[in-house]
Amino acid sequence: MKYYSTNGKAPLADLHKAVVKGLAEDRGLYMPQEIKKLPKVFFDNIGDMKFQDIAYNVASAFFGEDVDLDSLMDLVYDTLQFDCPVVKVKDDIYSLELFHGPTLAFKDVGARFMARLLQYFIRQEGSHEQVNVLVATSGDTGSAVANGFLGVEGIHVYVLYPKGKVSPIQECQFTTLGQNITAVEVDGVFDDCQALVKSAFMDNELNQHMKLTSANSINVARFLPQAFYYFNAYARMKQLGLADRLVMCVPSGNFGNICAALFGHEMGLPISRFIAANNANDIFYKYLQTGKYEPKPSIQTLANAMDVGDPSNFARIYDLYGQSHERITSLISGATYSDDQIRETMRQCYKETGYILDPHGACGYQALVDGLKQGEVGVFCETAHPAKFKEKVDEILGIDVEIPERLAAFMRGEKQSVPMTKEFADFKQYLLSQ
Ligand SMILES: *Cc1c(COP(=O)(O)O)cnc(C)c1O
């Protein structure tokens, strides 16, 4: 399969190149040239299939031309060593829990899949040179990427994060791992971390010294595997006899997760319609209302993994529907919630149902409460375990959220990080000495 750039000015790339490069030369996002429809018999039987087998079928449609099928099977099973259950919250509203992976948030799937796919291509090349992944994080991405790449031979990961700006629960998920993961604690803000990574990619001397690549969330190997979740959601709802008029609601920030769901829809997944739930960063919501896409600086909110003022994957959605506002609005609607509304939703839902929402999932849940029509059944993504945002959730609900053992284990680990200034010269010197 070849991949083209959404900006249309870069040469076509094969999967290997699209994964290693991340972004196309014209700074556009890679899109597969073809989206294969899955056969009717697959959908007829999907209710009896388990998550891993469903995912393998989906992965074959995307990657089957470029990865031999035994390796792909191995890769999918290695990535999905956990479940993705659908849980009834109330009435016709169900939660798709995407937080049963190693770092308790949905980005685990894409990060692990990408790590293994990159390793597959490195092995195929027969190269013994170490590949170095640089990633800047404000929290969630760093933990997902670090854990996804942990122990993957031939690849070393440097996670750059802003000192004192990442919650202790998030920090321990990438600073206590050791092995092939190095946490770099930058005396600056997130933007400084990102600037260091960008400068490193552009520095000739550094690139001659070592092989550098990114694990950005726009990478095709990170965003496409998220489609697995939606096929599984459909399967589980079909098993319950509730899949006839399914509405899928996705709390969205950079729009990678919902974009993967829309790719699923293009492959024939019978979802009636989609809702993109935003926090106060309502750029996509405004686009749906007005037809104008107007990026803004992001606003800090309670659902901080969705604080994005210029969602990268909008370009993919726009391209997928031939830049037609009409086609987009006929399939996708929006919602936007302030921090006060998020708090109120979390309290209300807990009181009524006992279900503990995290601030991201709360946007999704409320969008279904507000938007579901008679006869429809709604599934929202619960994108993170509430314990990941324990400080906030405890305060809002007046409870003591239980910390799952996996997270507790990270918290017992010893923090190891390399202190770094925000000067590129210092970071470069450090990398050159590795
Ligand atoms: C990353 C993230 C989101 C937003 O997902 P996008 O793919 O960027 O739209 C929502 N919730 C949580 C917990 C996240 O980590």
Image (cartoon, rainbow, N blue to C red):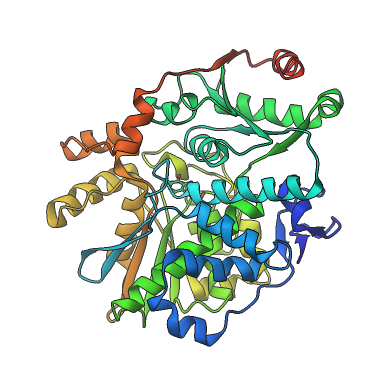
Estimate the x, y position of residue 69 in percent, counting from the top left: 65, 66
Looking at the rendered image, the quarter that the C terminus falls into is: top right
As rendered, which of 399 and 85 lies closer to the eye? 85
As rendered, which of 205 and 340 lies closer to the eye? 205
| As drawn, 269 above or below 76 | below
Estimate the x, y position of residue 240 in percent, counting from the top left: 28, 77
| As drawn, 366 above or below 327 | above
Residue 365 in sight in this render: yes
| As drawn, 296 above or below 61 | above
The residue depicted at 49 percent of the width and 35 percent of the height is 143
The residue depicted at 68 percent of the width and 67 percent of the height is 64
Left or right: 112 as drawn, with respect to 155: left
Res. 411 image quadrant: top left
Res. 406 image quadrant: top left
As rendered, which of 279 and 165 lies closer to the eye? 165
The residue depicted at 52 percent of the width and 39 percent of the height is 141
Residue 23 in sight in this render: no
Looking at the rendered image, the quarter that the N terminus falls into is: bottom right
Estimate the x, y position of residue 127 in percent, counting from the top left: 80, 40
Left or right: 354 as drawn, with respect to 217: left
The residue depicted at 42 percent of the width and 40 percent of the height is 103
As rendered, which of 248 and 153 lies closer to the eye? 153
Farthest residue to the left: give it.
351
Left or right: 408 as drawn, with respect to 293: left
Q: How many marks?
A: 0
Estimate the x, y position of residue 243 in percent, counting from the top left: 36, 79
